[in-house]
Amino acid sequence: MPVLQCRGLRKTFNQDLPESRPALDGVDLSVGQGDFVVLIGGNGAGKSTLLNTIAGAVIPDEGSLTMEGRDITRLAPHKRAAMVTRVFQDPMVGTAAAMTIEENLAIAERRGRSHRARALLTERRRAGHRDWLAALGLGLENRLTTQVALLSGGQRQALSLLMAVVSQPLVLLLDEHTAALDPRTADRVMQATLQAVSERRLTTLMVTHNMDQAIATGNRLIMMDAGRIRYDVSDEEKRALTTEALIERFQISSDRMLLKH
């Protein structure tokens, strides 16, 4: 049984406008346990809408979404929080700025379940938090009681990543989560991502505009255009891709859609 199954997902925003186009146009997608799927495509291709639909922020007009066989198509975001976690492009999103690092991590551990943050702050948990933070290489392991608002953008994004994985979600969503960071920090966060996904065998979907990153990351690559999946490649075929070949295919796909419309 696939971890994530999308069947015939359709979504059109502003349907009353004559120039409106489907953001999702019949998307069928099956993702297995431990798959790391990289999504690419131009602006308006449907990538973020697909992630928003999986996260519950968007309800499709048609189609269904199941997770480990459970229909969650219309399940509210907070009710699927234990199953789906997400790291956004903006480092300011995903953490509680007024709370400390350790309070943010304590809440993340109990995502989707009842909790009181301070009741979770035991010495045993603090030791675990220090170990997780030390692996990021940003010196945060010695700043557990620091208010998150005082962290840099890169530090907050690294914390957001850690918060997204500690609850062992069924699906991890990464929405261009390194795009707003400086190159050095982006590389560090990306390495931490790969380590976390590998160690925890997390089923992951990542959006990126970086072709080199798309080829080097994950075991499966999907290209979207005009709300549809145009190209889906995995394993050996994906590893054989070159940046030049991918850019050429991307250009052909975009040109066809321009001609069609």
Image: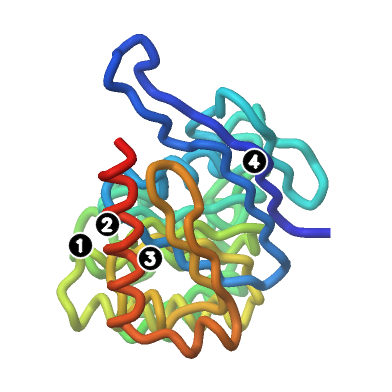
Q: What kind of residue is marked 2?
A: Pro
Farthest front residue? 259
Look at mark 3 in the image and give the residue it sits on. Answer: 159
- Quarter of the view holding residue 166: bottom right
Q: Which residue is at 66% across, 50% downward?
A: 83
* Disc on res. 80: 4
The one of 169 and 163 positioned closer to us in this rendering: 169
Cα separation, mark 3 vs mark 1, equals 15 Å
Q: Which residue is at 41% across, 44% downward?
A: 46
Q: What kind of residue is marked 1?
A: Ala
3 or 1: mark nearer the eye: 1
Q: What kind of residue is marked 4?
A: Arg
Of the two numbered discs 2 and 3 on the same chain, state the one appearing first in sequence.
2
Cα separation, mark 4 vs mark 1, equals 27 Å
The one of 75 and 221 positioned closer to us in this rendering: 221
2 or 3: mark nearer the eye: 2
Q: Which residue is at 60% across, 52% downward?
A: 119
The one of 46 and 110 positioned closer to us in this rendering: 46
**Residues at marks 2 and 1 touching, judged by CB atoms closer than 8 Å:** yes
Of the two numbered discs 3 and 1 on the same chain, state the one appearing first in sequence.
3
Look at mark 1 in the image and give the residue it sits on. Answer: 180
Look at mark 2 in the image and give the residue it sits on. Answer: 91
Cα separation, mark 3 vs mark 4, equals 21 Å
Residue 261, given in percent of the width and then of the height, sits at 30, 36
Of the two numbered discs 4 and 2 on the same chain, state the one appearing first in sequence.
4
**Residues at marks 4 and 2 touching, judged by CB atoms closer than 8 Å:** no
Of the two numbered discs 3 and 4 on the same chain, state the one appearing first in sequence.
4
Residue 261 horizontal side relative to residue 59, left or right = left
Residue 252, given in percent of the width and then of the height, sits at 31, 62
Q: Which residue is at 43% across, 25% downward?
A: 12
Cα separation, mark 2 vs mark 1, equals 8 Å
